Image: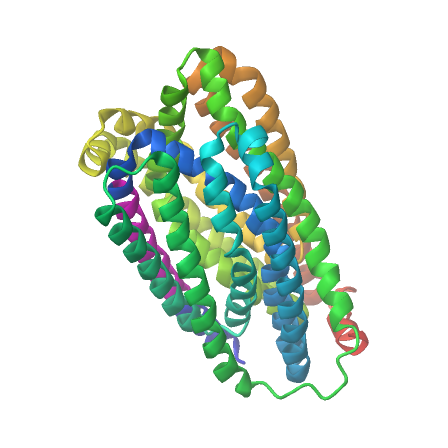
Amino acid sequence: MPVMSRTRKMLINTALLTVTSLVMRAVAMLFQVWLSRRIGTAGIGLFQLIMSVSSLAATVAISGIRFAATRLISMQLGFGAFHRARAAMKRCLLYALVCGCFAAAVLYLGAPTIGYRWIGDARTILSLRLLSLSLPFFALTAVIAGYFTAVTRVIKSAAVQFAEQGIRIAFVVAALTRAQNLPLERSCAVVIAGGVCGEIAAFIMLYVLYVSDRRKIPPARGDADGITREMFHIAVPLALSAYARTALTTLQNMLIPRGFRKFGASSEKALSDYGLITGMVFPIITFPQSLFHALSEMLVPELTDAEARGDRSRIGLLMKRTLTGSLLFSVAVMTLMIALSEILGNAIYHSGEAGRYIRRLAWVVPIMYTDSVTDGMLRGLGLQVYSMGVNIADALLSVILVWIMLPRFGVDGYIFIVYFSEIFNFVLSIGKLLSVTAGAARSRVKLIRGKPPKAQPKAANRADSG
């Protein structure tokens, strides 16, 4: 496909993902506002603790396979091996089913231990068991979404995301409106049950779309040697690093309310502060970041294709334009959030305290947003293991700082940790990306001087070896 045509298609798909993400984030934030008024900041805090365990369970369920599916299929399409792409999908779906069922069994059986000992709140056990039911469907949906990203037909997965969110929110609103004055345990369980229903519905819809779409790819002809090995080569290192990073992040989230309590807050106040910052303020801070989630998603197949074809000039051009655009946009967002922080807090949550936290955290927006795009580019260039290594180091340092600082400094200590974590992650990630850019620039100079880069033939060799 010509470069201009690919660029136009990438821009269209990025725009679709951006609109989808922005609308879904807006709806999710409105739902969060409604939910905070229904169950209070303490309920939001309890729900966020459940979701921190959910994040770890989801990581085990996926085990690196969404990115593996996107990159593996993109590579086969980049090499022109269309029949191998279809064979790759079969293996990825089987991998996801096994990992999803394993994660579901562990979470369901381990819910009492997790609730009592890890979280320290027995009210989470029912929600954790309900949550386990969604994990196999979540894993399979992730693979199919990765497929649609790889073939750059994201409109289908975007439509399903809209439907899934609508089903989840409609279920929760109807249930909590009908059942008044539920205890926090039951209220959180209703929210989780809505998510389970939405996840099952999303899988059914997305699978039907995939079965229809895969007819465009020729069936496997028995020459798919090496696909399984490549899948494991991509997914397993990513899964192992994701386990470590998400486990550390989950531990950090569990330690935060405990740190607030050691600082002197009551149990309910600790949950309220945790819920206010993580469940109410951060959704506002990260809302415009939807643009970069979409861009990061689309950069993976673009950079993978350019790498497979040895097109170093396109890699450098994509990096330069993406980093410049993300930095300019994020600075503008930071300025607006600082200026409008009080208005946002009072208008959305009727909380001046939320507005003050928005102002204090807005300064980290340029680093946070640009780092998100940087991670996407590293993954697109096959440096996902390095990126996850940085994230693991970041999470480990954050856990240590939470353990040391929160009992002494409370919320102020937590805000410092947020800044430290984002800066630490960004410096290491951008340093690696700039070194890749410098390498691409040197290769272009050699090419101009009549010295072809030595690494260019590797893509073709990989295509032959499978």
* Residue at x 40% of width, y 44% of height: 189
Foreground residue among 258 and 386: 258
- Prevailing secondary structure class for the magenta stretch in the rendered image: helix
Q: In the displayed structure, does residue 153 sit left or right of residue 22? A: right
* Residue 302 within the segment the image draws in magenta: no
Q: Quadrant of the N terminus?
A: bottom right
Quarter occupied by residue 341: top left
**Label tally:** 0
Foreground residue among 393 and 399: 399
Quarter occupied by residue 277: top left
Figure check: 276 above or below 154: above
* Residue at x 37% of width, y 22% of height: 268
Q: Is residue 118 visible?
A: yes
Q: Is residue 451 visible?
A: no
Q: Which residues are magenta?
A: 14-33
Q: In the displayed structure, does residue 268 sit left or right of residue 399? A: left
Tell me residue 230's x, y (percent): 74, 66
Foreground residue among 399 and 267: 267
Tell me residue 193's x, y (percent): 40, 52
Foreground residue among 228 and 429: 228
Tell me residue 95's x, y (percent): 67, 64
Tell me residue 149's x, y (percent): 51, 68
Figure check: 454 above or below 87: above
Quarter occupied by residue 265: top left
Figure check: 68 above or below 361: below
Q: Quadrant of the C terminus?
A: bottom right
* Residue at x 57% of width, y 20% of height: 403
Q: In the displayed structure, does residue 21 sit left or right of residue 98? A: left
* Residue 16 within the segment the image draws in magenta: yes
